[in-house]
Amino acid sequence: MYLTTSPEPILLHAWVRPGTHINVVGSSYDGPYEIDIELVKHSQFVVDSRASALAAGAELKRAIAAGAVDESHIHAEIGEILAGRQSGRESEQAITVYKSLGHICQDLAAVNYIKHRMLNE
């Protein structure tokens, strides 16, 4: 796994095979970005928080500013998928991208879940 604060994309759509999943977590402010606009455009885009992704998700914001996508390009928040309110990967060929901006409440919920699973096994 690589994390970066690159001012230019380090992963291009042309390099990504169908069926690939990518976690984009290298920055949590509107600045550096890791993937190009074409990869955002051609992905099933999932976020930890819509509001945060629209405010500070550099990759998504650049794609919107370029007119490649709009706000409706966000397929779902991760919590919606985990709760079963939205679908996950919609096809075996889909390129899925998860943009995480880092929310402590999600980290704490994950730790709590793991702790309870370990104590109950």
Image (cartoon, grey):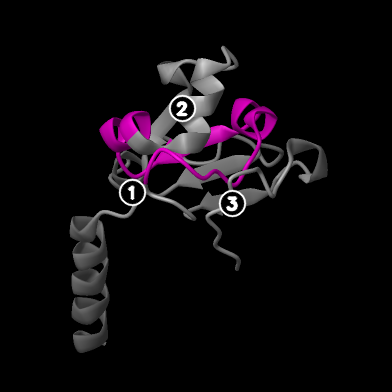
Q: Is residue 61 above or below residue 5?
A: above
- The crowding category of the residue bearing disc 3, from other C-alpha atoms within 10 Å (few below 14, some 14 to 19, many at least 20), is some
Secondary element type, mark 1: helix
Image quadrant where residue 49 sits: top left
- The crowding category of the residue bearing disc 2, from other C-alpha atoms within 10 Å (few below 14, some 14 to 19, many at least 20), is many
- Mark 3 vs 1, N-terminal side: 3
Q: Amino acid at mark 3?
A: Ser
Q: Bounds of the magenta span?
A: 29-55
- Mark 3 vs 2, N-terminal side: 3
Indicate which disc residue 61 carries: 2
Q: Is residue 94 left or right of residue 108?
A: right
Secondary element type, mark 3: loop
Where residue 80 sits in the image (x, y, percent)?
30, 39
Q: Is residue 27 left or right of residue 44?
A: left
**Which residue does the numbered mark 1 point to in the structure image?**
82
Tag 3 near tag 2, CB within 8 Å:
no
Please indicate, yes or no, whether residue 51 appears anywhere in the rendered image: yes
Q: Is residue 4 above or below residue 53?
A: below
Mark 1 → mark 2, Cα distance in angstroms: 25 Å
- Mark 1 vs 2, N-terminal side: 2
Where residue 58 sits in the image (x, y, percent)?
47, 36
**Which residue does the numbered mark 3 point to in the structure image?**
6
Indicate which disc residue 25 carries: none
Q: Is residue 34 magenta?
A: yes
